[in-house]
Image (tube, helix red, strand yellow):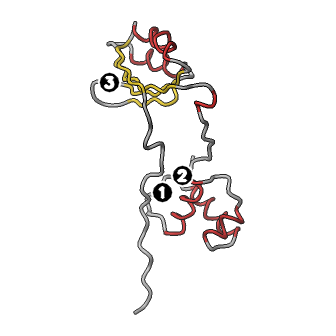
């Protein structure tokens, strides 16, 4: 398991991360040219960012609509007493739940799911209703998708005056 780094990034690491978020498949030679370093130097910095646990992996973004899922819904789920673990397992076992967060407050889970049509919603949620209360909202648009959090960049070292 990588160690978790608490030290701020330098400006070069920040630029590398931003470039990889934009396109994780970029060739090292192209990334190095964009950053203004050699490819081996950029590769070594990426390895250090991975070892520090800052970069955890690389992924693919899928367009659910292109796969036939025309709707997304956000479901707030409040398990009945003693049902928390069973409800959590039901959510984990349903592949149309794309993301699920265990949260504080009135609800225990907030989940996002994809649907081919609204007709799928009740059959998908009905099994949960024996063990939980749900509240559902259909997603109209997503002005902000998953994005990079603000990067803390260490100030550049000052040279002699």
Alpha carbon separation for disc pair 2 and 3: 31 Å
Q: Quarter of the image for the C terminus: give it.
A: bottom left
Q: Which tag, 1 or 3, sits closer to the chain's start?
A: 1
Is the Cβ of the residue at disc 1 closer than 8 Å to that at disc 3? Answer: no
Local crowd size for mark 1, using a 10 Å CA cut-off: few (<14), some (14–19), many (≥20): few
Is the Cβ of the residue at disc 1 closer than 8 Å to that at disc 2? Answer: yes
Local crowd size for mark 2, using a 10 Å CA cut-off: few (<14), some (14–19), many (≥20): some
Residue designated by label 1:
5
Q: Position of residue 126 (x, y in %)?
A: 44, 9
Residue placed furthest toward the left: 106
The residue lying at 63 percent from left, 42 percent from top is 60
Q: Position of residue 61 (x, y in %)?
A: 60, 40
Please name which of the two marks, 1 or 3, marks the residue nearer to the observer. Answer: 3
Q: Which mark is residue 53?
A: 2
Q: Which mark is residue 114?
A: none
Q: Is residue 5 above or below residue 60?
A: below
- Residue 66 found in image quarter: top right
Residue designated by label 3:
107
């Amino acid at each position: 398991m990588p160690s978790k780094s608490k030290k701020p990034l330098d400006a070069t690491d920040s630029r590398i991360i931003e470039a990889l978020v934009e396109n994780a498949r970029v060739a090292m030679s192209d990334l190095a040219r964009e950053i203004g370093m050699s490819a081996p130097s950029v590769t070594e910095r990426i390895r250090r960012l991975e070892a520090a646990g800052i970069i955890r992996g690389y992924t693919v973004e899928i367009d659910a609509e292109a796969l036939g899922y025309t709707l997304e819904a956000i479901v707030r789920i409040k398990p009945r007493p003693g049902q928390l673990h069973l409800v959590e397992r039901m959510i984990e076992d349903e592949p149309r739940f794309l993301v699920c967060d265990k949260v504080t407050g009135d609800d225990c889970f907030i989940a996002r799911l994809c649907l081919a049509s609204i007709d799928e919603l009740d059959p998908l949620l009905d099994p949960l209703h024996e063990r939980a209360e749900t509240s559902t909202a259909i997603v109209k648009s997503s002005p902000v998708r998953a994005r990079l959090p603000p990067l803390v960049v260490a100030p550049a070292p000052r040279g002699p005056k």
